[in-house]
Image (cartoon, rainbow, N blue to C red):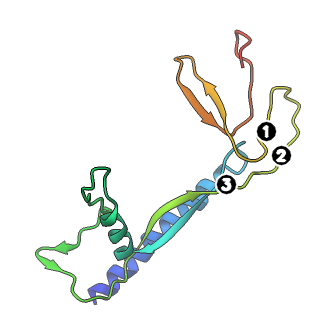
Amino acid sequence: MHRGLYAAASAMIVQESMHDVVANNLANVNTSGFRRRIPVNKSFPEVLMDRIEKKSEDGEIKLIAPPFQLGLKGKFLIGDLSLANVISETYMTTESGAIQVTDNPFDAAIVGEGYFAVQDGAGNIYYTRSGHFQKNGEGQL
């Protein structure tokens, strides 16, 4: 009986995470240079084994498991039936969006691969696909 509850709770968490990703994609639909994200759904044992098998550069196995508690008050799940699913990761799409003509002479677009390198006032360099540029008070882009 408890496995059914865990499976249902796991499914609800996965659906909530998928809704969060879709909501973020929709909220940024008009953001220039935004690339949508796609969630990847896997069973918990698959994710756990993927994380266990990831090794560091020195060959040491590092367990980077999701924050799931496998046991409760000394009782552990038994058997090979695992009904838990998780969002293991999200991928950013690489497809280009539609090019829009604007009245801003400083707007630019990237066709294909690449990023704009921009620098803030502190000298930090950031990369973006957004080509919406403006002049500051000193006449710099």
Which three-letter amino acid code belongs to the residue tagged 3?
Thr
14 lies above or below 103: below
Mark nearest the camera among 2 and 3 is: 3
Q: Residue furthest front?
A: 58
Which labelled disc corresponds to residue 99? 2
Q: Residue at x 27, y 55 (%)?
A: 59
Left or right relative to 57: residue 35: right
Q: Which residue is mark 1?
A: 109
Q: Is the residue marked by circle 3 packed among few (<14), some (14-19), or many (20+) residues within 10 Å?
A: few
What's the CA distance linking mark 2 and mark 3?
A: 15 Å
Q: Quadrant of the N terminus?
A: bottom left
Q: Which residue is mark 3?
A: 94
Q: Position of residue 122 (x, y in %)?
A: 52, 17
Q: Is the residue marked by circle 1 packed among few (<14), some (14-19), or many (20+) residues within 10 Å?
A: some
What's the CA distance linking mark 1 and mark 2?
A: 7 Å
Mark 1 vs 2: CB contact within 8 A? yes
Q: Residue furthest top?
A: 138
Q: Residue at x 74, y 35 (%)?
A: 131
Q: Position of residue 64 (x, y in %)?
A: 30, 59
Q: Looking at the image, is mark 1 or mark 3 earlier in the sequence?
A: 3
- Where residue 115 sits, quadrant-wise, is top right
Left or right relative to 86: residue 107: right
What's the CA distance linking mark 1 and mark 3?
A: 15 Å
Determine the secondary structure under disc 3. loop
